[in-house]
């Protein structure tokens, strides 16, 4: 899958996830809007910085395994990917962590899990070989 196709796929998954969002999910989305705006503006390092700060705040308020943390991790992984850092072990660890949290709290077939799995698809397109590649095949 090309980077363009992966971005389109992720966008479609994002629309589906947003359409099925709960009020709590929409509240979290509002907290992440500044980072998403920076992503849209191609200001990836700024988006990464905001997402990292939001991650620390969310972990402190909700715990490391909270669903809100997984949602912040998705934004952080996108910022890292779009900023050219997809091949780093840290990026892949964040993506895996988001999936693990979501699968444990929402179940493996939930649309939000698909969104996080799509981030692993990006790593496959970049030639990264990790156990995550096996999980990302579920997106196809």
Image (cartoon, grey):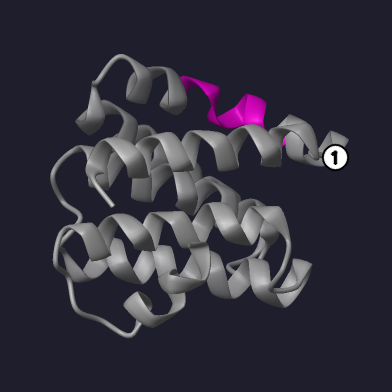
Q: Is residue 79 above or below residue 94?
A: above
Give the residue at x 47% y 49%.
74
Give x and y (percent) for residue 16: 68, 38
Give x and y (percent) for residue 56: 47, 51
Give x and y (percent) for residue 3: 24, 42
Give x and y (percent) for residue 12: 55, 36
Q: Looking at the image, can residue 94 be seen?
A: yes
Magenta-span inclusion, residue 95:
no
Decide which of 85, 134 is in the foreground and name it: 134
Decide which of 1, 136 is in the foreground and name it: 1
Give the residue at x 75% y 31%.
26
Q: Residue at the right extreme?
A: 23
Does dot 1 land on a helix, a strand or a loop? loop
Q: Looking at the image, can residue 61 be seen?
A: no
Decide which of 86, 52 is in the foreground and name it: 86
Residue occupied by mark 1: 22
Magenta-span inclusion, residue 31:
yes
Q: Residue at the bottom extreme?
A: 131
Secondary structure mostly taken by the magenta-highlighted segment of the chain: helix
Residues in magenta?
28-34
């Amino acid at each position: 899958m090309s980077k363009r196709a992966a971005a389109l796929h992720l966008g479609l998954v994002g629309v589906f996830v947003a359409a099925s969002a709960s009020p709590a999910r929409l509240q979290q989305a509002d907290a992440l809007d500044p980072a998403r705006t920076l992503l849209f503006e191609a200001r990836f390092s700024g988006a990464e910085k905001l997402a990292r700060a939001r991650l620390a705040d969310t972990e402190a308020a909700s715990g490391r395994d909270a669903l809100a943390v997984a949602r912040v991790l998705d934004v952080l992984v996108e910022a890292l990917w779009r900023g050219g850092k997809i091949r780093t072990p840290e990026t892949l660890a964040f993506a895996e962590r988001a999936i693990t949290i979501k699968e444990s709290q929402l179940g493996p077939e939930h649309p939000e899990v698909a969104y996080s799995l799509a981030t692993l698809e990006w790593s496959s397109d970049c030639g990264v070989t990790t156990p995550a590649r096996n999980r990302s095949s579920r997106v196809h």
